[in-house]
Amino acid sequence: MRGLTLLAVVLLAACNAPAVGPSPTPTPTQVPVEKVTFIAGFKPQADLPFVAVYMAQEKGYFRDQSLEVDIQHATSGEHIQLLATNRAQFSTGSAGDVMKRVASAGVPLVSIAQIGQRDEQAFAVRADSPIRTLKDWEGRLVGYKTTVSADYLALVSIGGIDRAKVREVAVGFDPRVLADGRVDVYPVFTANEPDTLARLGIPVRLFDPTSFGVPGLGLSFITNQQMVDTKPDVVTRFLRAAMRGLADAIADRDTAVEVVLKYATGEDRAHQRYMLDTEIDAAQNDLTRANGIGAMERSRYVALRDFLLQYGGLTKSVDVDAVFTDRFVKDLYKDGRLVWR
Amino acid sequence: MTARRTITDLGVALLAIAAIAAALEIWSRALQVPSYLLPAPSAVAARMATDAGLLAREGGITLSEAAAGFVLGTSVAFALATAMAWSRPLERTLFPLAILVKLTPIVAIAPLFTLWFGFGTAPKVAIAALITFFPMLVNSFVGLRSADLQEVAFLQTLGASGREIFRHLRVPSALPYLFSGARISLNLALIGAVIGEWTGADRGLGRVIFVANANLDLTILFGAVLVLAAIGIAANALVGAAERRVLHWHPIAVAT
């Protein structure tokens, strides 16, 4: 009888024992698996939001959050329309771009985590250029990528530049025009083009709008209004997994670059590392140190909107509360640390 | 007879366009399709009316770049085709190079043209020339080689020189092919100019399309596309008219 009792106790204990498995973290409450599509706003590369998603996919964090994520990449801006029609559920875009799309075309986009805390663009001159101050731009050939940007107009104003004395030219997206000496000032994406130019043997100096007080913001995770309204839990789970992937990328950058190269086949490893380091640096400030990576602050969106309105970046005003929400990212952190559940 | 047929053809084409536009209008209104996905034809028409000056100006720039590229590309192509028709060794040497040019993805190398030729008109003209080169080369070459061998032999027995045979037999025999090549190349020249304007331009319909795409401003984007199409149709009509006049003796003139 004592033997039977002992056997019963052992069996009961076995039934209640924790599951044996490789996961060091508690598995979240089981919910039906949701299929979503993340479309990165550009080709595969070490843009920090892309890296976050690559890492989350690689490490199974999306699976842990009951998400099946299809990762796609846009090549010519089609991610915005795909997101707007809910053919994709998550993407990336700069805060300023999101405002422009909402203001000018009424596209129902919402920023849900602000990864880049600084302006992602600057103006480069060759390191050996005699151009030292903004005023030195007068009499020079200054490039713009697509249209004359609000950043540029702000610098013209701040530097007291007589715009009539500047020759402005559309240069597109090929930094070789600076290397080749076809322009004197070239607009760069700070995360990659200075390194591209350095590799061409052309070190550059930057006129960074942020350092002149221009209120820029970089890339954010974005979704559509439908997801915010109808599937907020999916949004939270996506961000939680992505932010854990991002934390891993910051902690182990070599591994992160390895994972990036699985998507960005043929890309240069050192260049991807440069991008990653630059974007990690741009993703951190006092706000994120207190509240976690991706933290959002309403006053910065208001400042950005007002700045864009002042310098023609927006043709009409936009309600900042319609273009961003910090409710999801706030839910991810406690005392600035990511809570995994 | 020809004029009546042209008017009838034009009427049918306009009716077809109107029917498609009406269907799109009803569909976009019924489903309330957002303008950043597909603007209603009425919205595009309204925008074209508002920005008629802009579209005309930028269309004129694209047309001038395309025309210059067309003349340059087809002239070089005809000269090379003549050399190739004249000499088998030259044919064997040049034809693989021509195929290399044909297979080069223009969009990928377009930025290089800005590096080589600067920001002005030159890179757009060069791209338009490059894209028109191959169809005209092939058509010219085949046309020049299409002369009836018995007629060549006959002229030779009359003591005609190679130059005389070229002028009085080979070129006339090649004309239908040349017009066919011109029709293809003209439209390609327009596309080439637009591609050139996507990479480092501040004027032209290509730039209008590029900026409109970046801003999700699809009304002006489709407006620019329609202007481009209108230019292409007009250019084709012009070539068709020239073809009918020059080749009035040829069956093809009756067929077109």
Image: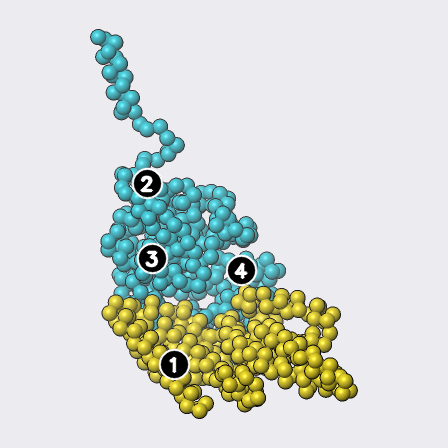
Chain colours: A cyan, B yellow
Q: Where residue A44 sits: x, y (%)?
A: 47, 54
The spot of residue B20 in percent (x, y) is 33, 75
Marks 4/2 in contact by CB < 8 Å: the verdict is: no
Q: Chain of mark 1?
A: B
Q: Give the number of the disc on residue A194.
A: 4
* Label 4 to label 2: alpha-carbon separation: 37 Å
Residue A36 percent location from the top left of the image = 34, 50
Residue B28 at x, y percent in the picture = 28, 70
Judge the density around disc 3: few (<14), some (14-19), many (≥20) Cα neighbours within 10 Å. some
- The image shows residue B53, relative to residue A21, as above or below, that is below
Could you confirm whether marks 4 and 1 are on the same chain? no
What's the amino acid at mark 3? Arg
**Chain designation of label 4:** A
* Residue at the spot of label 2: A340
Label 4 is placed on what type of residue? Pro
4 and 1 marks in contact (CB < 8 Å): no
Between tags 4 and 1, which lies in front? 1
Q: CA distance from mark 1 to mark 2?
A: 63 Å
Q: Give the letter of the chain under mark 2.
A: A
Q: Which residue is mark 1?
A: B13
Q: Residues within 10 Å of mark 2 (few under 14, many from 20)?
A: some
Amino acid type of the residue tagged 2 in the rendering: Trp
Front residue (pair B5, B67) = B5
